[in-house]
Image (spheres, rainbow, N blue to C red):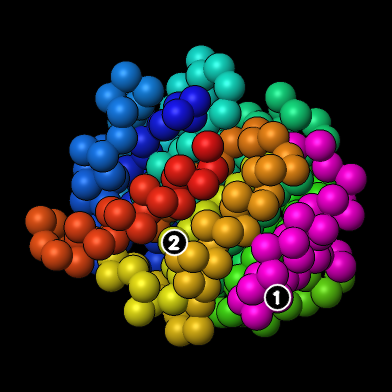
């Protein structure tokens, strides 16, 4: 395995009242990853405040973003940012796009995360992270492919329509070639792959905070990732939103096996 892992147990970007489980998820995954290839970003204990931004717990989210960027800058080659809430992709995309100006971002997530602070129903940064990366110029809208989103807010639909974002549904993704073609159509020469585990069907993974029915099967996700990686080099990736309800259970062992298959498909 050539991947390097940067663990970021951030929970402050999540809209869920059980967001602290995200830190448990990182702790559980840490045990399964090669220690010599893994580093960890310290996340503040406090929630933080919004500092007038309209983004809940903004001060903590911002601090974690800065710390994550610093750690990633010292990592050579492809990395996986392991969340935590999916707001951890902000730093990953910025660093990867800086190294690979022609990168495309593939966003596997039940949620498109295209809210602005104004359109967000929750104030949670995790629901804004992709929009923020587009608005601040880290990634161009025509270099983004949404994969498997099925829980849209009104403001997100408007933004996607206005920018003409490429969108593949769970059904589209039954054919692994569909995503490869969509990424090729962006003209990109490398990919950043964001995976919020809630892109999977809730029946397939126990530890989800924001489960949405009718998601992908792990096999479909793995097949699509392998097809994508056969065609494009990996600039970086995010694996986020693992939130086990209890550790050391049979479900947790099943979840870990699924997540490791996904990570292996990125390598
Ligand atoms: N990737 C996620 N889990 N995102 C949660 C976002 C939920 C909702 N769309 C919001 O903005 O609050």
Magenta range is: 163-190
Q: Mark 2 points at which residue?
A: 197
Image location (x, y in percent) of residue 13: 43, 55
User: What is the quadrant of residue 152 in the picture?
Assistant: bottom right
Q: Which of 213 and 141 is in front in this view?
A: 213
Quadrant containing the N terminus in the rendered view: top left
**Count of all numbered marks drawn on residues in the image:** 2
Q: Which mark is residue 39?
A: none
Examine the rendered structure and indicate whether residue 20 appears above or below residue 136: below
Q: Does the magenta stretch include residue 30?
A: no
User: Is residue 40 toward the left or the right of residue 156 in the image?
Assistant: left
Q: Does the magenta stretch include residue 184?
A: yes
Image location (x, y in percent) of residue 139: 76, 44
Residue at far left of view: 248
Image depth: mark 2 or mark 1 in front? 1
Examine the rendered structure and indicate whether residue 221 appears above or below residue 45: below
User: What is the quadrant of residue 245 in the picture?
Assistant: bottom left
Q: Name the residue under label 1.
A: 172
Q: How crowded is mark 2: few (under 14 residues within 10 Å), some or many (20 or more)?
A: many
Residue shown at 40%/66% (left/top)?
15
The answer to whether residue 249 of the structure is visible from this angle is: yes
Under circle 1, the secondary element is helix
Under circle 2, the secondary element is helix
Mark 2 or 1, nearer chain start: 1
């Amino acid at each position: 395995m050539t991947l390097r892992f940067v663990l970021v147990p951030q929970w402050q970007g999540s809209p869920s009242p059980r967001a602290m489980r995200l830190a448990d998820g990182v702790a559980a995954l840490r045990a399964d990853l090669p220690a010599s290839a893994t580093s960890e970003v310290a996340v503040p204990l406090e929630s933080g405040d919004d500092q007038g931004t309209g983004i809940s717990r903004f001060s903590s989210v911002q601090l974690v973003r800065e710390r994550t960027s610093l750690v990633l800058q010292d990592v050579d080659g492809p990395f996986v940012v392991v969340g935590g809430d999916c707001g951890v992709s902000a730093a990953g995309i910025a660093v990867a796009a800086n190294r690979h100006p022609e990168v495309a971002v593939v966003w596997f997530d039940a949620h498109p995360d295209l809210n602005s602070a104004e359109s967000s129903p929750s104030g949670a940064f995790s629901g804004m992270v992709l929009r923020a990366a587009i608005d601040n110029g880290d990634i161009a809208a025509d270099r983004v492919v949404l994969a498997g989103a099925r829980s849209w807010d009104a403001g997100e639909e408007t933004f996607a329509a206005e920018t003409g974002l490429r969108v593949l549904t769970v059904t589209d993704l039954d054919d692994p070639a569909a995503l490869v073609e969509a990424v090729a159509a962006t003209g990109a020469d490398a990919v950043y792959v964001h995976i919020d585990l809630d892109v999977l069907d809730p029946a397939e993974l126990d530890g989800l905070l924001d489960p949405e029915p009718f998601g992908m099967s792990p096999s479909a996700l793995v097949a699509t990732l392998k097809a994508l990686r056969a065609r494009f080099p990996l600039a970086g990736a995010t694996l986020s939103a693992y939130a086990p309800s209890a550790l050391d259970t049979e479900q947790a062992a099943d979840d870990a096996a699924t997540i490791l298959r996904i990570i292996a498909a990125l390598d």
